[in-house]
Image: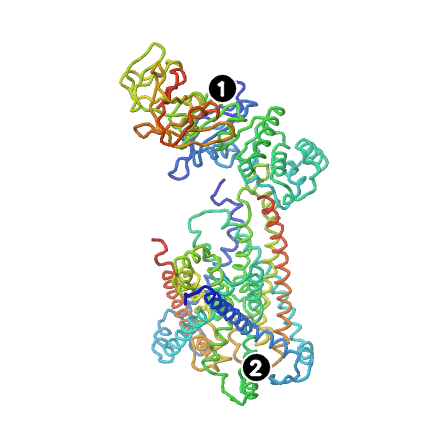
Amino acid sequence: MQTDTLVSIDGVIKRFGSFVAVQRMDLDIRKGEFLAIMGSSGCGKTTTLRMLAGLEAPSEGVIRLAGQPINDLPTWARDTPMVWQSLALFPFLNVRENVEFALKMRGVGREERRQRAEQWLERMQIAEFADRNIAQLSGGQRQRVALARSLVVEPQILLLDEPLSALDAALKVRMQSLLKNLQRQTGITFVYVTHSQSEAFSMADRVVIMSRGKIEQIGTPQDIYRAPRTRFVADFLGSSNIFDGTVSRILPDGVELDTPSGRLRQTGGSPEGRPGTGRPATLTVLDTRMRLSRTPPPDGTNVVPVRVVGEEFVGATATVYLETEHGQEIRVQKGHEELADLSIQPGQALFAHWSPEDGHLLTQA
Amino acid sequence: MSDDGAQDINRSRAVDWALRAYVVAAYAFVFAPILASFVFSFNSDRFPSLPLGQFSLDWYRAVAADPLVWEGLRNTLLVGVVAGVISTALGFGAAYTDYRYQFFGKQVYLALALLPPTIPVIIMGLAMLAFLSRMDLSGNALSVIISHVVICAPFAMAIVRLRLSQMDPALEPAAWNLGASEWQTMRHVVMPFTRPAILGALFITMAVSFDEFAIAWFVSGLNETLPVKVLGFLQGQVSPRINAIGSFVFVTSMTLVILAQVLLAGRDTTARRASGEQE
Amino acid sequence: MRRHLSLYGLTFSLPLLIWQLVFFVFPLCFLVALSFWTVRNFAMRPDFDTVNWVTMYGRKVFWQAYATTFALAAVASVLTSVLAFPCSYAIAFKMSDRARRWAVFLMVIPFFTSYLVRVYSWQIFLSDAGILNVLFGWVGLGPYGMLNTVGATMIGYLTLSFPLVVLLQLFSLVFIDRTLIEAAHNLRCGRLRTVFAVIIPSARVGLVIAALFCFILSFGDFVSPVYLGGGDPTTLSILITDTTKSGQQWPRAAVIALTMIGTLMVVAFLSVRFAYKGRNA
């Protein structure tokens, strides 16, 4: 075990009856990192978080906090506070009483309780609302109360279960930076469960992507974005075009694939795990790395004839939806200027192409 | 019929008015006996009818002068309060069990908890009398309390359960997660949250017990138990005193019910305001 | 976490269970045992003798009372349901939210008035010199003998069940998806046809349960048949009290009570099955 590991999840399995929510999981969470666990609903991310909090007991395996096994500790005997999706603020207590709750349960005296709560109320900039009812607060203020309530015990780790999902887009962005700053300043380990890619990628140091109770990939946001390891991850992120094919030739620094869209070449990346000739392989290309033109480019590598299906504008960029002759969908994302001279019309025939080093080969099918 | 729109609208308006008149008639039917009883309790005639006799408090005086009535009132209050408290405690436990736990045989448990009010009173009375007299429990206030708790606890359970269903399922786990044991959570989270419902249940069960006892009480003697009274109903002496006692009991019960209503509604508005702001 | 019952959980779940077992289930079971006891010289004695069952089931009076009670309760539940429906319908679909809340509140009030007081009050209306006959007299009609008739018993049953039936019907009606009704209108289903083709089928469970409650209440009621119906024809509840009073014949009363419970269980089971028929398809 590394010395900078705070939590180690060791061979943990969680079953509910015959349903396996989490399949044999191994994961180390480092001290002071911001870890996001991401996946669609039912992937086991919340169950994992609840096991860390002590709200579910692992069916098998060991969870250690700072080296100590905590499997048998009930949730009230661990310092693993959680921020809930619904926030779960106590509606019959005012803001101050909510923040003091954990201290009161630990038998901290009235005076100290008040002082420590005051610190966090000020830190979260909600001191002026201290005597208000929860019902009188706005969404953002409630978020701050929930954070203060959990952090007042000054834990080593904070668990967050999609706390921002109820907020509107603008407030969400503000809360994201607040969370990120808070995490940096306090050095407390944050474990943040979300289904939102933008939340995970904008805040986390490392992202865990889960599917059907299994970890699909762990890495920094950049790594995962550029080099998805599995088809699931590529699909889930939704920013890559995916080509299935068979390896027809091994190149010195890459491979050549035969796909329904033609012969495609990929270079770069680690040679490790590269499939041999004749084996099935999957190539992904980020939609921002694809180029479009009216005539095929002269060098002729990685050119796919396509037809325009539609176009969508989001802010400064546009996404063009295309289709190959075989009916495969292709997305290309570009700035408006780059697309201007193409004067895109539905049904128009174009050529999509990219350079071999912009392709990425999945190491797992 | 459908040849033009205006006619269609006229027709629907007629239907609406007819329905409104029907609703008024229905409420008149429901409230006629209640109001009549109230009015005739202040009427001097021995055999009440129209035209009204003179305004009189005779029946109230007659009731108030009867020492048995006072003893009965004391019994009623004693039974009502004790049965209310026990029913509310038991009903709260059952409601919390239903809210929190899944277990084998839960359907049976819930059936047991909720079924008693559906058994005809006369059968309950017969069964309780037969059983309690075997256990030498009949003939005193205790037996009435026991029977009333059987009938009232389901009401308390329903009221508390309704409140618990408004509680965020994460609230209890959140308290545990913040270091509160299950008992502490019960004391500091579940009970405060359900307090309006607990008080509401207390008043409602008291009101139910109050009326139930009243039925038995003024038709037969005072020292007899409910089941005996239930069986002895038919020999009862009916007189306008019934109106006086009935009105008194009605006013008392309604006070309890309105109190309960205010407690439950007061919380509701805060909750509604909260969810309104959240959106 | 920990969904199974712990000491903590049992503290909350057990008391009611024990109470209802000891003071509800056990007395009902005792009733079963009681029905096999024998009575000699006005004293009951534990026994296992089917004589009470044989005696009661061999009596024409018993079966007459049974048929009467069943028929009265059945008529009461149909009558109450039919009379209550327009009222519930109007409250559910024709009133503002505020008016509806008031309507519900008013319908709850009767539950907190003594049923017996209300029945006594009906006597004031229905008796030979009562309010209604006085009113009829003013327009030169009557007097009519209204008290101590089956009609008066029905009024008593209505007094007993009408508010409950309205509330139960109402709760099933307000949960009907309004768009269903608009869709029906949109598909040229007329107003009245919408009621029968859309609203009643959608609210079937609630309507049947309401009728069932009316049946249960009327079937076991003894106040209306005695005080408004004059005790004639004899119902099962009257028979129970008569039997109990005549020489400690509690075992026979137990037979009647158990027969009533059995009947109610069968009726309840059949209605619930009817209510949910086709729901799970």
Neighbor class of circle 2 (other Cα within 10 Å; few <14, some 14-19, many 20+) is: many
The subunit letter for the residue under badge 1 reads A
Tell me the residue at 55%/58% (across/down). B156
Q: Residue A321: image x %, image y %?
A: 40, 30
Tell me the residue at 50%/32% (across/down). A193
In which image quadrant can residue A245 be found? top left
Residue that protrudes farthest toward the bottom in the picture: C140
Residue kind at label 2, given as amino acid type: Ile
Residue kind at label 1, given as amino acid type: Met
Q: Is residue B129 visible?
A: no
Q: Which residue is mark 2?
A: C124
Q: Residue B131: image x %, image y %?
A: 48, 66
Q: Which residue is mark 1?
A: A1
Residue C22, above or below A8: below
Q: Residue C135: image x %, image y %?
A: 56, 85
Tally of marks: 2
Q: Is residue A297 visible?
A: yes
Looking at the rendered structure, the secondary structure element under dot 1 is loop
The subunit letter for the residue under badge 2 reads C
Tell me the residue at 47%/81% (across/down). C231
Residue C272, above or below A17: below
Q: Residue C194: image x %, image y %?
A: 41, 62
